[in-house]
Amino acid sequence: VIIPLNFLRKPDDPLGFMQSFDNNQRTTNHRVGITGNDFKLSEKITLNRAHHSLTLLVVALYIYFERLFTIKAASKVDPNFMNQIKDHVVNGKIEAAKAVCIQVNSPVSRLIDKGISRIGRPLADINSAIENAGKLEVYSLEKNVSILATISGAAPMIGFLGTVIGMILAFHQMASSGGQAEMGALASGIYTAMTTTVAGLIVGIVAYMGYNHLVNRTDKVVHKMEANAVEFLDLLNEP
């Protein structure tokens, strides 16, 4: 009994060549499909690095604005503050001078209040008390500012790390697929990897500029503190 094999052939393909071509095409497509899915792994890893950079950006902006408002408030000093202190100290009204310092409630006033509380002791003790109070005030102004410096250096490194990992995985997957990777999938993986570098650099630049601005503003406040402290010590040295 002879079984006809015509049903294995397409009507327009009497020799069955199209069926063989379709089988090869399905095999190739299946192979490329696996490669395209594999590229999603590198994209996922690099996107996670981008999310880390975004988190660092939010933290950097929060610290910057929180410190900026604090330093701005600390830099406000009443122009007549030292004149009032001089009048009260010269007239022997120590308690009134302390009341003025408490009312103003700024780093400069707290520094002067510490000196007023030591009036009657040797000048070296007064100077030492003012210096110690000044160190505490500076520490309070610089709180969390060092985190900005850390972010400015760490964010670009995290971005570079995401890029390197993404590129390594992309080329490894391309090599593992026997060169059958689609250019679209490869370009997508490289694009996602490079995005982490851009994100890291943006965060690093923002954090670096914010850090330097806060340091500059803090230095101005410290200068005011030193100037008022010297003026107060000169007042005590007057005969």
Image (cartoon, grey):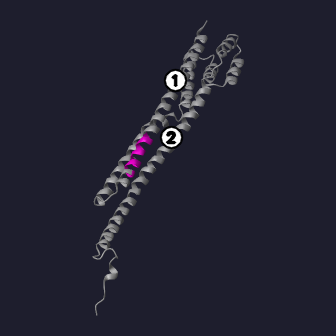
Residue closest to the eye, 43 or 64 = 43
- Give me the disc on residue 57: 2
Residue 2 is left or right of residue 101, and the answer is left
Q: Quick check: 210 above or below 8?
A: above
Mark 1 residue element: helix
Residue closest to the eye, 38 or 15 = 15
Q: Amino acid at mark 2?
A: Leu
Question: Quarter holding the N terminus?
Answer: bottom left
Q: Is residue 197 magenta?
A: yes
Residue closest to the eye, 212 or 238 = 212
Real-space CA distance between mark 1 and mark 2, rounded to the nearest whole angstrom = 25 Å
Q: Nearer the viewer, mark 1 or mark 2?
A: 2
- Can you give x and y, in whole percent of width and height, for residue 14 in the image? 29, 77
Looking at the image, the residue that sits furthest to the bottom is 1
- Disc 1: which residue: 219
Magenta-highlighted residues:
188-200
Give the residue displayed 60% in from the left and 26% down from the top.
72
